[in-house]
Image (tube, grey):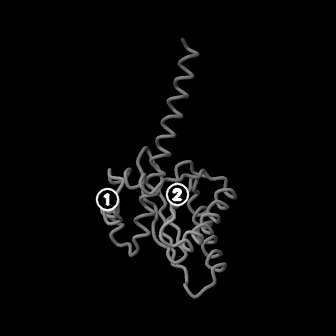
Amino acid sequence: MNAGVVLGVDPGLSVSGFGVMRIVERKVQLIECGALKLPAKESIPRRIGLFYDFFSGKVREHGVSMLVLETPFLGKNAQNFLKLGYLRGVLSLIVEQHALQLGEFAPREVKALVTGYGHADKDQVARVMHRFFPTLATQRYQDTTDAVAITLCGAWKLQIDSALAGARERASRSQGVL
C-alpha cells in the first residue's frame, strides 16, 4: 500500500465522479480521473454492486491509502439523500476492508480550499481544476471535476499530516539530544 495515494469520490446512483492522485516528492500528480456511469434501468441493488466492484478495484489497482469524499447535505430531495447514503455506506465498507484512512470535507471547505471562496459555484471549481490539471478539459461530467477537487483536498491533507508527523519526530529527537 502506498502511503501517498488518494482516491476521491463524488458518489451518485447515476454518475459517480472519481479522481486518483499520488504524492511524489511533495508534488501532487493526477494518476486517473473519470466517471462511473451506472445503468439507469438496473435495480438499485445491482447499481450498488457495480459501484462497489468498481471502487474496490480502483483501491487495489492503485494501492490507495486514503479515500476522500464530501460530507453530505440534505438538499431538496430527501430520496436522493437517502440513496446517497447507500453509496456512502459502500465506501465506508471499502475503507474498512482495505484499512484505508477516510477523509471527509464539507462542500464549502472543498470550494474554499481549491478556489479561495467557500461559495464558489461548480463552474468556478471546474475552471480551477482545469488550470491545475489541463487533461481534465476532456472530461465529460462535472462529477469528475468535483471528485478531482475532493481528491486534491485529500492529497493536501496527507501532505500536511506527513509534514506535521516529521516535525513532531524531529522535535522529540532534539529533546533527547539537549
Which residue does the image show at 51% across and 39% down from the upper left? Answer: 162
The image quadrant that residue 128 belongs to is: bottom left
Which residue does the image show at 64% across and 66% down from the upper left? Answer: 90
Tell me: residue 168, above or below residue 112.
above
User: Going from the N terminus, do you reach mark 1 or mark 2 first?
Assistant: 2
Front-lying residue, 78 or 175: 78
- On the image, the x and y values in percent for residue 41 come to 57, 88
Tell me: residue 37, above or below residue 103.
below
Q: Quadrant of the C terminus?
A: top right
Contact, mark 1 vs mark 2 (Cβ under 8 Å)? no
Determine crowd level at label 2: few under 14, some 14-19, many 20+ residues with C-alpha closer than 10 A. few
- On the image, the x and y values in percent for residue 16 come to 51, 71
Q: CA distance from mark 1 to mark 2?
A: 21 Å
Name the residue beneath numbered marker 1: 128
Q: Amino acid at mark 1?
A: Val
Name the residue beneath numbered marker 2: 71
Determine crowd level at label 1: few under 14, some 14-19, many 20+ residues with C-alpha closer than 10 A. some
The image quadrant that residue 38 belongs to is: bottom right
- Say the numbered circle drawn on residue 164: none
Report helix, strand or loop for mark 1.
helix
Residue located farthest toward the bottom when viewing the structure as drawn: 41
Instruction: Please state if 113 lies on the left or on the right of 75 as rendered.
Output: left
Report helix, strand or loop for mark 2.
loop
